[in-house]
Amino acid sequence: MEKQTIVVTGSNGQLGRELQVLAAAYPYDFVFADRTVLPVDDREKVDSFFAEHAPTWCINCAAYTAVDKAETEKQAAFDINGEGPGYLAAACRRHNAKLIHISTDYVFDGTSATPLKPGDPTGPINTYGASKLAGEQKAIGNHPDGTLIIRTAWVYSEFGANFVKTMIRLMKERPAINVVDDQIGSPTYAADLAAAILHIIDSPSFIPGIYHYSNEGRISWYEFALAIRQSIGSSCAVSPIPTSQYPTPAKRPHYSLLDKTLIRDTYRLVIPAWEESLAVCMSRLG
């Protein structure tokens, strides 16, 4: 049987880097492509890249993720997050490949009071969320039988810029910090998400559709910050504040807790608690 080829776009991001760490343990040919090699919003380059590598799978980690900047750079956000997944899905369809596309809790309006299910009504409240929703729709529209979308939230890892690393830095630099306490969700350790994606690829059957993935548990950003402080033994004072005291160009959803039942049951996934995964990441960060 011919070896399967997996193209990973956005390979320099948090998830792309975690997939690179895991790749050696899997019997696939991985092709890791960052934006300089494969700009997903350039249809011609996507098509020629697929013609060259003929992948069996594409894991799309490429995204425009500057949430606040997206409010003034709408075109860039919609090109990368909206058009890009559509181009990848169309290329996957032509090459009989499957697409695993990473999306976000920001496709919701954040007003729910119960964990968000994949079929719940969407309603993004900022440009980033709107661009990611457009990408979901284009990907499914172009390759409905071969596209699997994973919405995730609050992603962190030892790579790149993220909440955990920012908190560690601020707690070392400052005697006191304020952290928002009225936004609820559960963090996602990118290493866990990477392992879940490869588990799906390894699964005996592929069931397309929209799924949700984050670590287990329910916390606020403030509670997450307290756990990070405890982990590093910092004496920095951490105070809770409402979102209204921390204005940003882009609105943030107040509620981002994702219901993982579908992905857990369909692909028999064991999802770690956020506390366990934070401990693993902190030990890797040293």
Image (tube, rainbow, N blue to C red):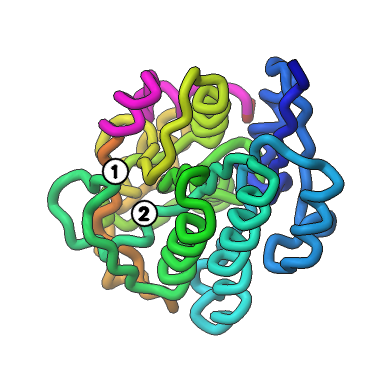
Which residue range is magenta in the image? 261-284
Mark 2 secondary-structure assignment: helix
Q: Which residue in the protein does label 2 denote?
A: 105
Q: Position of residue 86 (x, y in %)?
A: 57, 62
Q: Which residue in the protein does label 1 denote?
A: 258
At horizontal 41% and vertical 47% (from top left) the residue drawn is 151
* 277 is within the stretch colored magenta: yes
At horizontal 40% and vertical 40% (from top left) the residue drawn is 187
Tell me the chief SS of the magenta region.
helix
The N terminus lies in quadrant: top right
Amino acid type at mark 1: Leu
Q: Position of residue 282 (x, y in %)?
A: 54, 28
203 or 269, which is in the foreground? Answer: 203
- Residue 104 horizontal side relative to residue 69, left or right: left
Name the image quarter holding residue 40: bottom right
Counting residues from the start of the chain, the first of labels 2 and 1 encountered is 2
Dot 1: within a 10 Å radius of its alpha carbon, few (fewer than 14), some, or many (20 or more) residues? many
* 114 is within the stretch colored magenta: no
Q: CA distance from mark 2 to mark 1?
A: 8 Å
